[in-house]
Amino acid sequence: MSERKDITRRRVIKSGAAAAAAAGATPYFFTQAFADGHGYMNAPKGDSVTFGFNVPQTGAYADEGADELRAYELAVEHINAGGGGMLDTFSSKELKGGVNGKTVKFVTGDTQTKSDAARASAKRMIENDGAIMITGGSSSGVAIAVQGLCQEAGVIFMSGLTHSNDTTGKDKRANGFRHFFNTEMTGAALGPVLKNNRNYSATLFLLPLGATI
């Protein structure tokens, strides 16, 4: 893989998505009352909560994983400081100085952009580190696999970059959330542009699961 560190559109979108996933997680998910009412594992106790950042630290998407992790770390810094970055645009007070007053700590895992490796690292963070929320990833296949594990374990999954419709379509889970657009949205946005600017009468894009454009 190239060692170039160029700033690309995909990397910028990916880093922003990572920060949004960490900072935008609804605080009510991380309360004792919510955990008690829904049978969640690792219910928040004490004066801190732990997030699990599951990103590709090795493999083809390692550079993007490093960007993603930096964005997550910055989001945690802003949350604990009570302001900064996107946090300043939020009206909610629950993310001012931690989450509901609890300091945010984090642990990391390496997905390797492989479903089995991603599930294994997420499982470790949930069972060994007490993570109450798992987020991250650079592939829809990984997102779907980890989302299923989080549903079984009883923790929240906030997807990182997942483009597939299936993540919140046929493979949706109650504990899984997305904020990144899907392939249907991409097609709806690109179709008119391609038609008007490229004179295409009809264009068909076939993408494998986990591919992005």
Image (cartoon, rainbow, N blue to C red):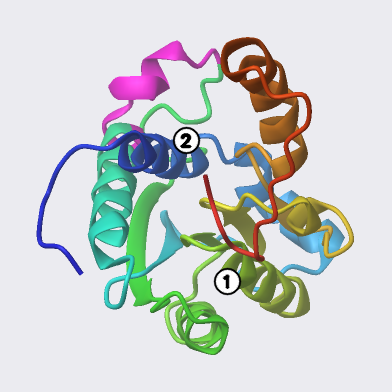
Q: Quadrant of residue 32?
A: bottom right
Answer with left or right where residue 188 lies relative to residue 27.
right
As for residue 82 lying within the magenta part, the answer is: yes
The first of marks 1 and 2 along the sequence is 2
Res. 83 in view: no
Residue type at mark 2: give it. Answer: Ala
Secondary element at image label 1: helix
According to the image, label 2 marks what residue?
Answer: 20
Provide residue 38's location: percent of width, then percent of height.
Answer: 84, 61
Provide residue 66's location: percent of width, then percent of height.
Answer: 24, 58
Number of other residues with Cα within 10 Å of mark 1, as a class: few under 14, some 14 to 19, many 20 or more: many
Q: Nearer the viewer, mark 1 or mark 2?
A: 1
Provide residue 8's location: percent of width, then percent of height.
Answer: 27, 37
As for residue 6 lying within the magenta part, the answer is: no
The foreground one among 83 and 144 is 144
According to the image, label 1 marks what residue?
Answer: 142
Q: Residue furthest right?
A: 170
Q: Residue at x 61, y 65 (%)?
A: 143
Answer with left or right where residue 212 lies relative to residue 86.
right
Res. 59 in view: yes
Q: Main secondary structure of the magenta part?
A: helix
Which span of residues is magenta-colored? 79-91
Between the C-alphas of marks 1 and 2, the distance is: 19 Å
Secondary element at image label 2: helix
Q: Quadrant of residue 151?
A: bottom right
Residue type at mark 1: give it. Answer: Val
The foreground one among 48 and 90 is 90
The foreground one among 143 and 24 is 143
Q: Residue at x 76, y 79 (%)?
A: 152
Answer with left or right where residue 112 lies relative to residue 152.
left
Which quadrant, please, contains the N terminus? bottom left
Provide residue 92's location: percent of width, then percent of height.
Answer: 56, 19
